[in-house]
Image (cartoon, helix red, strand yellow):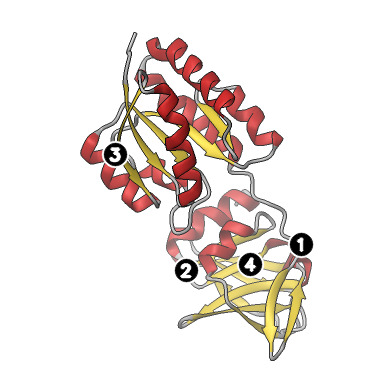
Amino acid sequence: MKSVYTVIIIDDELLALKRLKRLMEKHVESFEILAEAYNGEEGLKLIEQHKPDLIFLDIEMPGMNGFEMLNKLEYLPKIIFTTAFDEYAIKAFEENSIDYLLKPIELERLDKAVEKLKRLSGVETEALPLQLNKLIAELKVKKVVKSIPVKIGDKILLIKPEQISYLEAKDKYVFIVTDENKEYLTDFTLTSLEEKLSLPFLRVHRAFMINCDKIKEIHKGFNGSFSLIMKDSNKTKIQTGRSYNDNVKGIFEL
């Protein structure tokens, strides 16, 4: 049984990070803190450099969240998540050997995490990626977006997803296009909107994401591509991108 775990803490919230370090001082016999990082990019570098036994990892971080960081790792240590996820997500954590600490972290809960860590010290590290993949799949449930805010002068207009025919990136800007072919400039990138919007929204091109419920016709093109005719008043024709053709095939079983 391992007595002292080398640790890296990754959390963009400085106060939360300091609180965790203070609580970990109660377990100096169990933890040796090697480094701390304030974002996913720093975390990646430090993990590959130090190869710690264990990381305490925040999930919601700007730029690169905890899951995205883990997917880029070549070396995978044991993981204790620090999170503010809801009860559904917590249930997913409890069904895996990977532990979690719900913010704000309490000493009693950290004590239990240490006990669990010791109990699981014999678990083969090769099994952890499988458990982690299951956990990521369960937690990557997209939040239901009820509206997307767009600025019009001094006003903020809320566009409901069901009003949207498609979204288009033009140069550095992204436009929301409605059934009536009204265009609204949004501050979001197409990638961030792709993360926010689940089906029936689907990325079909580097510059386009569509509402699948607003497709009128699908025509097969060259090299496995498709031409999508939308139901908007202009009957907009959108050509799928090569790397996105499989998305369309999978959704519509073509």
Residue under the point 50% across and 67% down: 205
Quickly name the residue at label 3.
47
Q: Which residue is mark 2?
A: 206
Sort mark 1 into few (<14), some (14-19) or many (20+) by Cα contacts within 10 Å: few
Tag in front: 1 or 2: 1
Q: Residue furthest bottom?
A: 153
Picture quadrant where residue 107 is located: top right
Marks 1,2: beta carbons within 8 A: no
- Find residue 120 and report its horizontal and vertical position in percent: 44, 13
- Which element carries disc 3, helix, strand or loop? helix
Badge 1 marks a residue whose secondary structure is: loop
Q: Earlier in the sequence, mark 1 or mark 2?
A: 1
Q: Position of residue 55 (x, y in %)?
A: 39, 33
Mark 3 vs 2, N-terminal side: 3
Q: Earlier in the sequence, mark 1 or mark 4?
A: 1
Judging by the rendered image, the residue that carries numbered circle 1 is 146
Measured in 3D between alpha carbons, the distance from the residue under mark 4 to the one under mark 3, in whole angstroms, is: 38 Å
Label 3 crowd bin: few (<14), some (14–19), many (20+), radius 10 Å: many
Q: Give x and y (percent) for residue 151.
A: 67, 83
Q: Marks 2 and 4, how far apart in space? A: 12 Å
Is disc 2 surrounded by few (<14), some (14 to 19) or many (20+) residues within 10 Å? some
Looking at numbered disc 3 in the image, what kind of residue is underneath it? Answer: Ile
